[in-house]
Amino acid sequence: QKEVEQNSGPLSVPEGAIASLNCTYSDRGSQSFFWYRQYSGKSPELIMSIYSNGDKEDGRFTAQLNKASQYVSLLIRDSQPSDSATYLCAVNTGFQKLVFGTGTRLLVSP
Amino acid sequence: DGGITQSPKYLFRKEGQNVTLSCEQNLNHDAMYWYRQDPGQGLRLIYYSQIVNDFQKGDIAEGYSVSREKKESFPLTVTSAQKNPTAFYLCASSTKDRFTGELFFGEGSRLTVL
């Protein structure tokens, strides 16, 4: 079992819709969780971090964490073509060591 | 502006040659990392360093070496022992905090072995 699992996609949504990206992790002791966005050929950039169960909202982005079920999700409301990218889930499994999922490719069509 | 600078952006290497990728940060971060990214795969950790003059192997350290002589600098050498070095290499830094640690990435270095 991979430590951090994501559906590779592509996830296709029309402009204006809600995109829902999911991630599961195996280490129950994980404490912090991150979503990175990576445009093709570019480096990842952090868009959301979440540390406790529940929802965390930042603009059009909402991160959701459920430690009991070991999953974290990212919702993107009012999706825009500029949101088309690969979204990487990352889990901090210990002192300063992040484990990344393989990413979900999101395509937002005009 | 604060950030992480990687150089070169593109590098071509002949088989059997060692190459060194530069990574410099002015964010005053204690921890620095090197990741490798291959198509269709997530980022895999090569080496990381939490303080000057100390570093630890990540998941795929074989064929690579690093040094951390200054807080700002964490160069990565890809040696001839690395069997499949063609990849996108990413340097990152973060604050030294146990339960947080957002990574700030450089723009990456794309290495191609001819």
Image: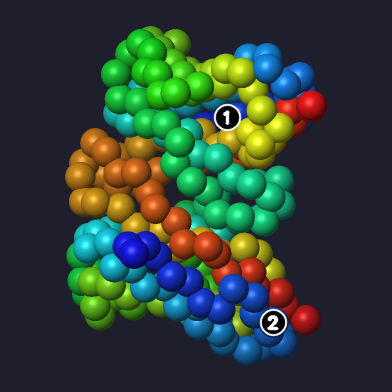
Give the quarter of the image for residue A12. top right
Q: Is residue A67 visible?
A: no
Could you tell me residue B106's position as x and y percent?
47, 62
Numbered label attached to residue B100: none
In the image, what residue occupies the spot 56% across and 21% down?
A76
Give SS at disc 1: strand
Where is A11 relative to B112, above or below?
Answer: above
Residue designated by label 1:
A5
> Around disc 2, counting alpha carbons within 10 Å, would you say few (fewer than 14), some (14 to 19), or many (20 or more)?
few
**Position above or below: B42 against A2:** below
Q: Is residue B106 left or right of residue A81?
A: left
| Image coords of residue A10 (percent x, y) | 76, 30
Q: Using the image as rendered, state which of residue A21 and residue A70 is in the foreground.
A: A21
**Chain bearing mark 2:** B
Residue at 51 percent across and 68 percent down: it is: B62
In the picture, which quadrant includes the N terminus of chain B? bottom left
Chain letter belonging to callout 1: A
User: Marks 2 and 1: same chain?
Assistant: no
Instruction: State the separation of the CA atoms marked 2 and 1.
Output: 33 Å
Amino acid carrying label 2: it is: Phe
* Secondary structure of residue under mark 2: strand
Of tags 2 and 1, the one toward the viewer is: 2
In the rendered image of this protein, does residue B17 appear above or below residue A31? below
Q: What is the crowding at mark 1: few (fewer than 14 residues within 10 Å), some, or many (at least 20)?
A: many
